[in-house]
Image (cartoon, coloured by chain):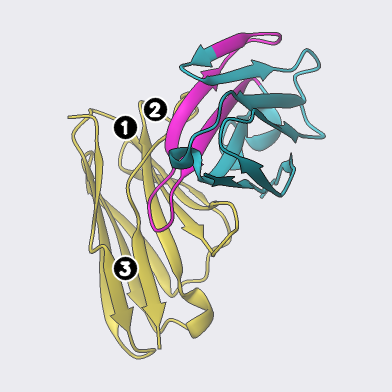
Chain colours: A cyan, B yellow
Amino acid sequence: GQQLNQSPQSMFIQEGEDVSMNCTSSSIFNTWLWYKQDPGEGPVLLIALYKAGELTSNGRLTAQFGITRKDSFLNISASIPSDVGIYFCAGQGLASGNQFYFGTGTSLTVIP
Amino acid sequence: DTEVTQTPKHLVMGMTNKKSLKCEQHMGHRAMYWYKQKAKKPPELMFVYSYEKLSINESVPSRFSPECPNSSLLNLHLHALQPEDSALYLCASSHRIGANVLTFGAGSRLTVL
């Protein structure tokens, strides 16, 4: 299956700092999803994006669907300890047979 | 009910055992999925069911046998597994195949001894 490149692979930040991560693909996607996964749990949907250029917020989280349709970005503002976890992007499009394939993940550690 | 429920939460089995993982959703979703996830890696698609019929098998070894008895239930039957099959197995569902949101269960942590 396909895999999307996500960066950075890991981040260690101080509480209160802003966080940025991105996901890139060699293929065009029609949908981008961002999930957060806590250890031993399933991924929980944070934000869904359906249109190139779309910018969507969910509380302190903001995500954007890249204009080229080959990338997406997630920003977290004013991080707090409960933001700790692994963040995955997931892309869907014709190139993936309309199935979702996941990015390699960004592990976030927030230092109080 | 907006949940996908997976049982058991944890399973330990020997290589000669036969066991099953179960998944249930009552959101009226007609597509259900099994993903396998190794530690610190992304989920990898294994199987997709659409309207209770197997739609996609991502070249998964036959020691994993999926079953969809009805639109709400999805099973994964396990037999003669190897230690490298130890992983978190995630079930997900969506309104239909190709729908643009996936809802995941909490996963079943499988350990093969």
Horizontal and vertical percent position of residue B12: 31, 80
Mark 1 — on which chain does it sit?
B
Q: Secondary structure at mark 2?
A: loop
Mark 3 — on which chain does it sit?
B
First-in-chain label (3 vs 1): 1
User: What's the residue type where badge 3 is placed?
Assistant: His
Marking on residue B77: 3
First-in-chain label (1 vs 2): 1
Residue pointed to by mark 2: B96
Residue A94 drawn above or below residue B18? above
Q: Residues within 10 Å of mark 3 (few under 14, many from 20)?
A: some
Judged left or right of residue B18, residue B89 is right
Mark 2 — on which chain does it sit?
B
Residue pointed to by mark 1: B30
Q: Residue at x 55, y 28 (%)?
A: A33
Q: Nearer the viewer, residue A44 or B55?
A: A44
